[in-house]
Amino acid sequence: CESRCCGVPRAESEEKMRLGEAREILNVHGYSYEDARKIYRRAALAEHPDKSGHANSTERFQRIQDAWTCCQAAQEAGAWSDDEFGDEREDEFDEEDEDIMMDVLGQMFFAQMFGGRGAPPGRPPPRGFAGGFPGGFPGGVPVNLPSGFAAGFAGGFPGGFQGGCASNSCNCEECKWERRQEARQFQQRSEAQERQRERMQEEHRRRQEVAHQRSHRNEHQQQHQQRRTQQQKQEEEPEEEKPQEPRCETLRKEGNTSFESGKFAHAAQTYSAALKATPKAARETRWYAEVLSNRSAAYAKLERYDVALNDADKCAKLAPDWPKAHGRLGNALVGLFELERAAVAFEQAATLSAAEGGETAAEQWRGKAAEQRAAAVRRAEEKAAAAAALERKRREEEARREEA
């Protein structure tokens, strides 16, 4: 197995990974985030334990995963480009880093020498290697040791350490305990990374909020300054007196507003007041015809088609070259089911629109004319069918009376 009791130390980092270290692991210095993502995927695929033949593929794969988690946290906090996390120098170790490093080195030493990190309280000691060092080191180890030690381990370990773990599927108590410890450490690292990511996200959110508030404040100040400048100009320059608008025009605008709001009865009344307030000299003008056209439309909305036809007819006489006047006339005739006359009015509107260069409007009027002609044919057919049914019913009744 890959636990420390089997003498194979893991290379997992116990320290909080920095962005510079993560880039070093993935070899993505100077790359964009999207390019770094592609490089990570290729590396993760190559180093996956199921595909890689490397002896410590699990540790290498986990190291790559941890490095990419750090890169993701940097991207989420908006610090991928400007190294907001700080690519600290490797010699900036604090006390926590030193404690973690000493713990890792101690675990690696015990894993190599005794097959584990020692026994926890109340448990038997670990079993070590199966073969030991039967030959010893005859010449000693050429290192300078403190006084009290001989020149190395001259006697070796004749008996060796019997019964060490030699299988990747070991279920001994030592391996189980090791796996639990490693799972707990992995969970702690994951939680620490998550907390770090949340802190960075919160800091990034706070900075964005401050920037937004500053931008909003500046915009508000600019608007306030513009209003003050405009007000000062108005105070310095006296406003010119505008000519008073005729009452009939005021009433026409009020009627238009009511019509657009769906208040057709009030619009018709207001148009009538505007027509009444129009001076006699202006009652033969295009303006007067437009007010008549508007009132005809209001009456048509109220389904008072007879009055709408009267206004439309007057409008067409005042402005015979205006396409909309004939259109109003056609709409009123449709409401009265005089479909043939309506089609003629629509065709006249189309001819005038085409003469003015309004091909789109002309096409619309032609469409309405064709529609009314088709409706007229259908109405005639329906009348003929109804008359035939009535005649058939009358003949049947006469036949029954003769038989009786």
Image (cartoon, rainbow, N blue to C red):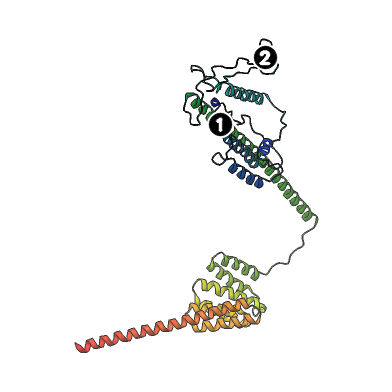
Front of the two marks 1 and 2 = 2
Q: Quadrant of residue 115?
A: top right
Q: Total of numbered circles in the picture?
A: 2
Residue 363: percent from the left, percent from the top?
Answer: 58, 78
Q: Does dot 2 land on a helix, a strand or a loop?
A: loop
Residue 199: percent from the left, percent from the top?
Answer: 62, 35
Q: Classify 10 Å Cα crowding around label 1: few (below 14), some (14-19), many (20 and above).
A: some
Dot 2 corresponds to which residue? Answer: 151
Eyeballing the image, is 101 above or below 252?
above
- Please, what is the three-letter code of the amino acid marked with disc 2? Ala
Q: Nearer the viewer, residue 81 or 240?
A: 81
Residue 236: percent from the left, percent from the top?
Answer: 80, 55
Residue 336 as seen in the image, left or right of residue 112: left
- Please, what is the three-letter code of the amino acid marked with disc 1? Phe
Q: Quadrant of residue 37?
A: top right
Q: Nearer the viewer, residue 333 or 208?
A: 208
Residue 386: percent from the left, percent from the top?
Answer: 36, 83
